[in-house]
Image (tube, rainbow, N blue to C red):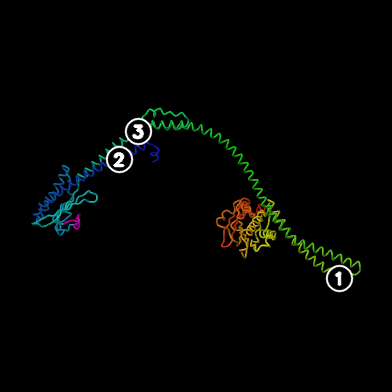
Amino acid sequence: MQWIQRSFKHQIVLILFICMSLFGFGLIIKNYIDDKKQLNNILESQVMQLNNRFALSIAPKIFYNELYEISDAIFNLYEYNHKSAKDSGGLFLIKNIAVVSLDKKIIGHSHPREYFINTTYTEEFINDIQTNRESYSIEWNDTHTNLYIKTPIYASGNIAAYLYMNIDPLFLKTKEKEIFNHLFIFTSLFILLLILVSLLLSRLIDKPMKELLEGLQDLGSGKLTFEYAMKRHDEFFTLAQALHNADKRIVEQKEELLKIQLSLEDMVEERTAELNTTLDDLQKFQKQLVETEKMSALGSLVAGVAHEINTPIGVSLTGITFIESETKNVRKSLENQTLGKNALSEYFDTVVTMSESMHLSLLSAAKLVRSFKQVAIDQHTEDKRHFNLKSYFDEVLTSLHNKLKYEDVQIVNEVDTSIELFSYAGIFSQIFTNFIMNSLVHAFDDTTTNNKIVLKAWIEDGSLYLIYEDNGKGIDEDNLKKIFDPFFTTKLGKGGSGLGLNIIYNLIVHKLKGDVYCTNKDKGISMTISIPIQELEDEQYTM
């Protein structure tokens, strides 16, 4: 069908073909139906007249039971009809004639060798139930090739028998052949007419259309000339004139666009330079914000660790001062020769006790310094190292002890002890430090009780899964989708910068190639982090 859609001429030819076909074939079918109906009426009229005359002629023979005369009459009528049809081409041909009694016994038949007298007649084509037994009945078969007639035969005013005829309408078949021949002739003439119409349309349409199509290739050049179409006085002239005007407008618009393009190029270069400058400033500002956030976290960590170290160092300093004082007293007593055994023994016990206390205090301080040193180094270096995840989280919690000891919160580390990673330890420290501080600021307050934070981690299906949960107040559903956006905070003006979770998101997604999302629980929130395990393995070690 594309050849029709792509050609105006073909569409016109198709429309003409459909219209002429509907008109022509409709006219032929109407004439055929009218002629056939007229012929049917003539045929039925003549057949009924023949049946009536023949029924009247054999009625006395039936009354007197003259079977031989009935058979002769049937045979004569049958032979005369066939001879007439053969010699002069009759209107119809009798295929068989049967005279049947009221009890369905054959009285006479045109084919006595096949249908014997006094046998039951079984080929009654017309249903007695659907027709009046005292009236004439005439019917066509389904294919309209045979006509069946049933005529009552009266004797002394009563029906004595029935006359059955099976008629072949020879003339109708001949007429149908003539109609089909006419249809063939009409179709041939119609196709010839279509060819002539196509040639005429080609002359009237193809040349100007071809000129217009070829000219469209140069549309916008300002050189369009439609010599043939401009000489016409029909729609092609209007179309050619419109295309010529459009060509002029396009040339004018091209010149205007060229001027605008030149000015836009200058404007784009200027805007691009401004945007590049702005982008550089934003990148510098972003780095400054990230560093500020890191230094803020580290400053808070330093302050906490310094406060924690102050106690064990103070205890140790007090012990050293006390030992120094006692030593001076013992030495003075020794010089004065007043030092007794009991005093010396008491001095030794005191020194041992104070030494043990000082040792425990210094061990605690050393542990704090170690944790602080490792966490601080991790947060300010970009190097990967091997570490045990559960142990490292314990070190992070130790470094946060100063913050946590004043909070009514229990932190449970349920990380699998077998997880060994080769990654950026500082990122993991920054992630969970940020999560914990967010819970302390946003999730827990004076209205919450039994405050609890749970850390979980395991490896499954080639990924490391880390879960951070608290049982605090949760997050509003409207804010849940925005918590990782930069500068989003519910504590605006109260110390919140809105960059903490955004930095965490960028570290997880861009640095660790992972994913993070937050959901509300029945009570509190759950942060889920997934990181591909290949990002957490030592390539040299695994190879």
The crowding category of the residue bearing disc 2, from other C-alpha atoms within 10 Å (few below 14, some 14 to 19, many at least 20), is: some
Residue 266 lies in what quarter of the image?
A: top right
- Say which quadrant the N terminus sits in: top left
Span colored in magenta: 122-132
User: What residue type is disc 3 on?
Assistant: Leu
Residue 257's spot in the image, x, y percent? 51, 34
User: Does 140 sit left or right of 286 as displayed?
Assistant: left
Residue 470's spot in the image, x, y percent? 61, 61
Which numbered tag is attached to residue 201?
3
Q: Which residue is mark 1?
A: 343
Q: Are marks 2 and 1 in contact (CB under 8 Å)?
A: no
Membership of 125 in magenta stretch: yes
Q: Which residue is mark 2?
A: 21
User: What residue type is disc 2 on?
Assistant: Ser
Label 2 or label 1, whichever comes before in sequence order: 2
Q: Residue at x 36, y 29 (%)?
A: 233
Alpha-carbon span between mark 3 and mark 1: 138 Å
Residue 189 lies in what quarter of the image?
A: top left
Alpha-carbon span between mark 2 and mark 1: 139 Å
Magenta region, main secondary structure: loop
Q: Are marks 3 and 1 in contact (CB under 8 Å)?
A: no
Label 3 or label 1, whichever comes before in sequence order: 3
Q: Residue at x 11, y 55 (%)?
A: 154
Callout in the foreground (3, 1): 1
Look at the numbered disc 2 and give the secondary structure of its residue. Answer: helix
Callout in the foreground (2, 1): 1
Look at the numbered disc 3 and give the secondary structure of its residue. Answer: helix
